[in-house]
C-alpha cells in the first residue's frame, strides 16, 4: 500500500525526533490478549504489523507496556460480535519514559474507543 510506504518513509526521516503515532491500525498484535474470541492475527495495511512499526522505528505500544496482563478493547465488530484492541498509541522510547498512564475509553457512540496517554513532559527534559 502506497500510503503505508509513505508513512514509514516519513517516520524514518523523523527517527531522531520524538514520535507519537496513534490511530486505528485495524490489526491485533496478540489474538489471545487482544481479542474477545480467539482468531487469526490480522496484518496491518501493506503487510506491516504493529510490532514491525515498533521494531523498525523504536516505538512502544504504550497501553500493552503498562498493562501487560490485562484485556481491554478498542473496537466492537457488530458483524462478528467480537471485541478487539486494534487502536494504538505508539510512542518513541524516549517519550515512553514520560508516560504516567494510558487508558482505553468506552465504546459508546462509534464502534471504536479512544486511547489516551498522559505524559509528564516536564520530567522528560
Image: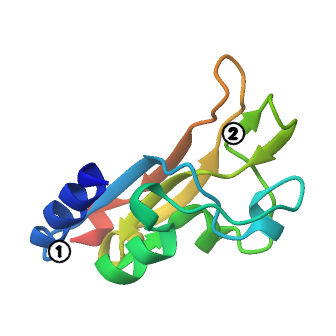
Q: Which of 102 and 57 is in front in this view?
A: 57
Residue farthest along the top direction in this orientation: 109
Q: Which residue is drawn at 55% across and 63% down?
A: 43
Alpha carbon of mark 1 to alpha carbon of mark 2: how far? 29 Å
Mark yes or no: residue 97 visible: no
Q: Position of residue 81 (x, y in %)?
A: 87, 35
Q: How many labels does the image show?
A: 2
- Image depth: mark 1 or mark 2 in front: 2
Residue 104: x and y in percent read: 65, 45
Is tag 1's residue or tag 2's residue first in the polypeptide sequence?
1
Q: In this view, does 97 lie to the left or right of 4?
A: right
Which residue is pictured at 43% across the width and 67% down the height? 48
- Relative to 38, is 58 above or below? below
Residue 125 is left or right of residue 38, and the answer is left
Residue 49's place in the image compared with 2, above or below, is: below
Residue 121, position as x, y percentages in the image? 30, 60
Which SS class for mark 1?
loop
- Mark 2 is surrounded, within 10 Å at the Cα level, by few (under 14), some (14 to 19) or many (20 or more) other residues, namely many
Compared to 113, does 116 lie above or below? below
What residue sits right under mark 1 in the picture? 15
Residue at image x 80%, y 44%? 83
**How dense is the environment of label 1, judged by Cα within 10 Å: few (below 14), some, or many (20 and up)?**
some
Q: On the image, numbered disc 2 is attached to which residue? A: 75
Label for residue 55?
Answer: none
Counting from the top left corner in percent of width and height, residue 1 is at 32, 54
The quarter of the displayed image where residue 12 is located: bottom left
Task: Name which quarter of the figure residue 97 lies in.
Answer: bottom left
Amino acid at each position: 500500500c502506497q500510503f503505508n510506504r509513505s508513512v514509514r518513509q516519513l517516520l524514518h526521516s523523523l527517527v531522531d525526533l520524538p514520535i507519537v503515532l496513534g490511530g486505528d491500525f485495524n490489526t491485533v498484535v496478540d489474538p489471545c490478549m487482544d481479542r474477545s474470541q480467539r482468531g487469526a492475527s490480522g496484518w496491518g495495511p501493506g503487510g506491516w504489523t504493529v510490532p514491525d512499526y515498533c521494531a523498525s522505528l523504536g516505538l512502544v505500544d504504550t497501553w500493552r507496556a503498562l498493562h501487560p496482563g490485562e484485556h481491554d478493547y478498542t473496537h466492537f465488530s457488530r458483524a462478528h460480535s467480537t471485541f478487539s484492541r486494534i487502536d494504538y498509541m505508539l510512542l518513541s522510547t524516549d517519550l515512553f519514559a514520560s508516560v504516567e498512564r494510558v487508558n482505553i475509553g468506552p465504546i459508546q457512540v462509534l464502534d471504536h474507543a479512544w486511547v489516551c496517554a498522559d505524559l509528564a513532559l516536564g520530567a522528560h527534559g
